Image (cartoon, rainbow, N blue to C red):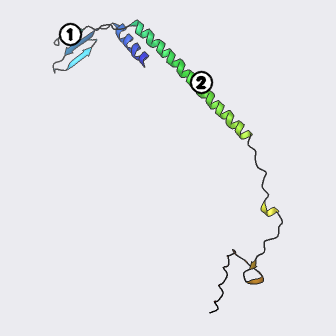
Amino acid sequence: MILVLLISVVTFTASGDEVNKWIDEKGKVHYGNVPPETDSAPVKKLEIQNNFDQNEYEKAKKRHIETEQFAKELEKEREEEAKRKVEEEAERKANIKHPPPFADPRSINLPRPYYEAPRVPGKPWIGIPIPVEPTPLPSGK
């Protein structure tokens, strides 16, 4: 950005054009390098000082080059870090020990569980087993 500013200042001052200032009939102030066509407005030529400093320009140019090199180094480091992360992820995935495949329960031939119905011996019970609380004994009084 500094370089752009310096270049614009250099091109403006290097052009060597005159800057004129005049006020038109309506009282509006104008600036330009071409004086007005009518001679009725007095034209004042403005003196522009050349404040260009070659040393400052060279310093700014050097800073710009250093900044560009630093940015390239950072980008290179980011790319290397991303590449390293991809390699680590690939290595991690390659080293995963997969558990043995589980047997499909339908392929195992086991007898179905058999539950007897509560308080009905010999009759199969269908449903969810419910815990049975013992019935209290009647008191002897």
Question: Circle 1 sits in a helix, a strand or a loop, which is it?
Answer: strand
Whether residue 3 is visible to the viewer of this picture, yes or no, is yes
Q: Residues within 10 Å of mark 1 (few under 14, many from 20)?
A: few
Q: Which residue bears the numbered disc 2? A: 76
Image quadrant holding the C terminus, namely bottom right
Disc 1 residue type (three-letter):
Lys
Q: Quadrant of residue 133?
A: bottom right
The residue depicted at 78 percent of the width and 55 percent of the height is 102
Q: Which residue appears at 38% of the width and 10% of the height? A: 10
Q: CA distance from mark 2 to mark 1?
A: 56 Å
Whether residue 35 is visible:
no
Taking the image as shown, residue 70 lies to the left or right of residue 82, namely left
**Residue found at x 78% / y 53%:** 101
Q: Secondary structure at mark 2?
A: helix
Q: What percent of the width, then of the height, locates residue 37?
A: 22, 13
- Residue 25 is left or right of residue 8, and the answer is left
Residue sitting nearer the eye, 68 or 30: 68
Say the numbered circle drawn on residue 44.
1
